[in-house]
Amino acid sequence: MINTLIKNIQEKNAPIVVGLDPMMNYIPTHIKESAFKEYGETLKGAGEAIWTYNKGIIDATYDLIPAVKPQIAMYEQFGIEGLIAFHKTCEYAKEKGLVVIGDIKRGDIGSTSEAYAVGHIGKVQVGSQTYQGFPEDFVTVNPYLGTDGIKPFVDVCKKENKGIFVLVKTSNPSSGEFQDQMVDGRPLYELVAEKVVEWGSECMGDTYSNVGCVVGATYPEMGKVLRKLMPKTYILVPGYGAQGGQGKDLVHYFNEDGLGAIVNSSRGIIAAYKQDKYARFGEASYADASRQAVVDMLDDINGAIGRK
């Protein structure tokens, strides 16, 4: 699957991913009013509004981007109806030729991780039939439980040609409380990075591994070190835009081949119309604002890393 992601990135010259992390206050009034008129102010109405909102953004940006990254918590808060919107969003993105990175951050004891892996990137057995629970290509995984929690995902990746991104150094302010702790003179995130390389060696694509990692844009110096520790590991980079990361911060996340990283922006794109910079588009043209935000992000990142 990493080969497919790289192919999409190269064809569109776009090392970015749009995070589809909808909140009800992001969704334009006309979309909510239409959904609530049909289904009432209910969880089903919320799910319909989310799906309609996401579809508009995908329709406006799919020709520019290689992938989307829906954050499942933003859907789970609306229960089953939210998960239906999540599934529809993933399915529609794949119909548009996009790679889907399910931001699920799972990771548990072996049997539970196996169920998560099967449900999100594998196939579940039902009698004599098998079914795909969610149409995702990659998922994010928490390594806190060690190899027990990761191996089931790697096994499914090998079987189904799918991929994972393992949390190594996250973009949030308190990430250092655990991730930066020193272990035998080295920060914990470096030890996790070395395990990612080990896990990834079992699941290689042509050049890069199907086992990638997550390193936040808000810690560029750490990203520089981690890039050297994981030369064949694709880095998913959150924290661009709304969290403060900029294109100039990301140069060292990429390898000399111009590959090796894919940068995420979520609310900076999907709620672009709320920013002063894109206010001219207005609510009715929220998706056009999102498209312009993608164009601007590409200009910033490609300019910083020397891509044309």
Image: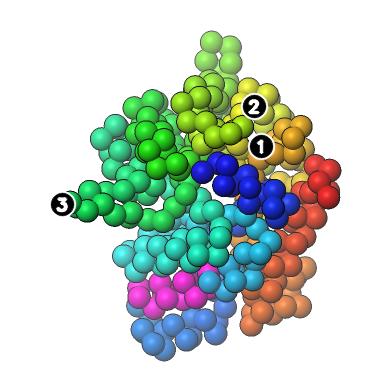
Of residue 79 and residue 214, the one placed in the foreground of this image is: 214
Element assignment for label 2: loop
Query: Which stretch appears magenta?
Result: 43-54
Question: Which of the two discs, 1 and 3, sits closer to the camera?
Answer: 3
- Residue position marked by numbered label 3 in the rendering: 127
Q: Nearer the viewer, residue 156 or 264?
A: 156
Residue 231's disc is: 2
Whether the magenta-drawn stretch holds residue 47 is answered as yes
Rounded to the nearest angstrom, the CA distance separating label 2 from label 3 is 43 Å
Q: Is residue 194 visible?
A: yes
- For the residue labelled by badge 3, is the local secondary structure a helix, a strand or a loop? loop
Mark linked to residue 260: 1
Which residue appears farthest toward the top when viewing the image?
184
Instruction: Single out the residue that lies furthest toward the bottom.
Output: 37
At label 2, which amino acid type do we have? Answer: Pro
Instruction: Name which of mark 2 and mark 3 comes first in the sequence.
Output: 3
Left or right, 147 with reference to 252: left
Say whether residue 134 is magenta.
no
| Mark 2 nearby-residue class (10 Å; few <14, some 14–19, many ≥20) | some
As measured in the structure, the alpha-carbon distance from the residue carrying label 1 to the one carrying label 3 is 41 Å
Q: Position of residue 12 (x, y in %)?
A: 70, 55
Which amino acid, mark 1? Answer: Gly
Badge number at residue 124: none
